[in-house]
């Protein structure tokens, strides 16, 4: 599998470098605004926080390939990884201002722009990836994408970050009490902060780009992210324990600047949207293959890997429930119930 994954990485890199005649850095200076509204080439600056070996970036390269091919070069895509254009919040704000065209953040930071998005980060909401796909790609998912327009953002599709697990340098998380006093980095999301406080941890919100150094210097004891991120970002170099809490299924949202989207022809709008769905399917496929493989790689790298029991998870659910009730009040009980109903419906359909 690793061979296929690396071959895919290599193939994509060669293709893209061939397509854009060198790295994204040289292309960025002074090219971004050329062509807007003039019918000439339109340039998209697409930035993410994760690095260039992550399934998210590989799928972004696929999206670039589809869009450039289907628009016969009328749209050019420059891709930036590893927070080169800033963190999730900064890049989302840049889209609102029209100084960047695409970013693909987790739903957690988006809740700072559209509070209802917090429901997608309710711990233990989605039982598995298949149920998440059904809900996100369904009516409820579309309803949430439509909420972004008031924020000068257009949501084209949902991609996958995945089930988040906890790593740290102190101890294995085998029960809720093991969170006691742990200095944990979280994404910039109040629900995440309050949920980890309820579990007894000492959470700190921090941009993804600052995380590795914070763990290296001991500013934080640990963090939580899906297995592919833990492995591909090299967290095993600065962390000793990984525990499969699977406490949140984290979707990504493929965002485009509304100003830029509205400036496209109808045909181009269809191309960028359909390409986001198509490349999103690739992102999910690569991510799920990566989870299986990289769990073993983390053990091989010497991390202490423990499976968290269903009983321990049930204990954590009970402890964070009051926080969820509080947020349901804040973001609207009806909205939250609608999502839980969609989860139950999807689960029933998949069980048939
Ligand atoms: O590219 C996406 C990242 O910026 C971020 O969303 C990753 O899950 C993430 C985190 O923990 O910040």
Image: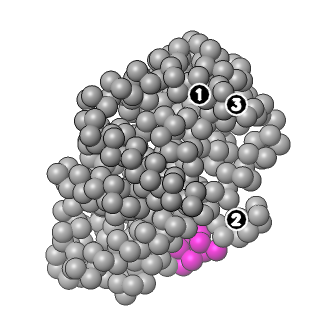
Mark found first going from the N terminus, 2 or 1: 2
Quarter location, residue 332: top left
Q: Relative to 205, is 74 on the left or the right?
A: left
Magenta segment's dominant SS is: helix
SS class, disc 2: helix
In which quadrant of the rendered view does residue 193 lie? top left
- Verify whether residue 16 appears in magenta: yes
Q: Toward the viewer: 343 or 205?
A: 343
Instruction: From this view, report whether residue 259 is shown above or below residue 178.
Output: below
Q: Disc 1 on helix, strand or loop?
A: helix
Q: Which region is colored magenta? A: 10-18
Give residue 216's position: percent from left, percent from top: 63, 28
Residue named by callout 3: 309
Inspect this view and state whether residue 32 appears: yes
Label 2 belongs to which residue? 5
Q: Residue at point 39% right, 23% down?
A: 323
Mark 3 or mark 1: whose residue is earlier in sequence: 3
Q: Which mark is residue 16?
A: none
């Amino acid at each position: 599998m690793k061979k296929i994954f690396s071959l895919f990485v290599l193939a994509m890199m060669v293709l893209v470098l061939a397509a854009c005649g060198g790295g994204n850095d040289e292309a960025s200076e002074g090219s971004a605004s050329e062509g807007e509204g003039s019918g000439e080439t339109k340039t998209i600056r697409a930035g993410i926080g994760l690095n260039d070996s992550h399934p998210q970036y590989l799928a972004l390269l696929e999206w670039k390939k589809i869009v450039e091919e289907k628009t016969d070069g009328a749209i050019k895509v420059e891709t930036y990884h590893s927070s080169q254009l800033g963190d999730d919040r900064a890049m989302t704000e840049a889209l609102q201002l029209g100084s960047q065209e695409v970013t693909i953040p987790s739903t957690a930071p988006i809740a700072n722009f559209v509070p209802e998005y917090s429901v997608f980060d309710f711990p233990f909401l989605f039982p598995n990836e298949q149920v998440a796909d059904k809900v996100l790609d369904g009516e409820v998912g579309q309803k949430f994408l439509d909420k972004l327009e008031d924020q000068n953002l257009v949501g084209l599709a949902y991609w996958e970050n995945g089930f988040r697990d906890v790593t740290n340098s102190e101890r294995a998380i085998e029960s809720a009490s093991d969170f006691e006093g742990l200095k944990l980095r979280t994404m910039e999301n109040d629900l995440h902060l309050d949920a980890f406080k309820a579990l007894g941890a000492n959470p700190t919100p921090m941009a993804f780009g600052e995380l590795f150094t914070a763990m290296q210097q001991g500013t934080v004891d640990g963090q939580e992210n899906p297995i592919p991120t833990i492995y591909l970002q090299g967290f095993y170099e600065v962390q000793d324990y990984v525990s499969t809490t699977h406490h949140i299924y984290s979707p990504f949202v493929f965002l485009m600047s509304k100003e830029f989207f509205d400036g496209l022809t109808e045909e181009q709008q269809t191309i960028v949207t359909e390409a986001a769905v198509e490349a999103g399917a690739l992102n999910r496929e690569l991510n799920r293959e990566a989870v299986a493989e990289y769990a073993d790689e983390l053990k091989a790298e010497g991390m202490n890997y423990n499976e968290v029991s269903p009983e321990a998870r049930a204990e954590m659910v009970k402890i964070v429930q009051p926080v969820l009730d509080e947020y349901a009040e804040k973001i609207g009980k009806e909205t939250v119930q609608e999502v839980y109903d969609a989860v139950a419906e999807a689960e029933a359909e998949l069980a048939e």
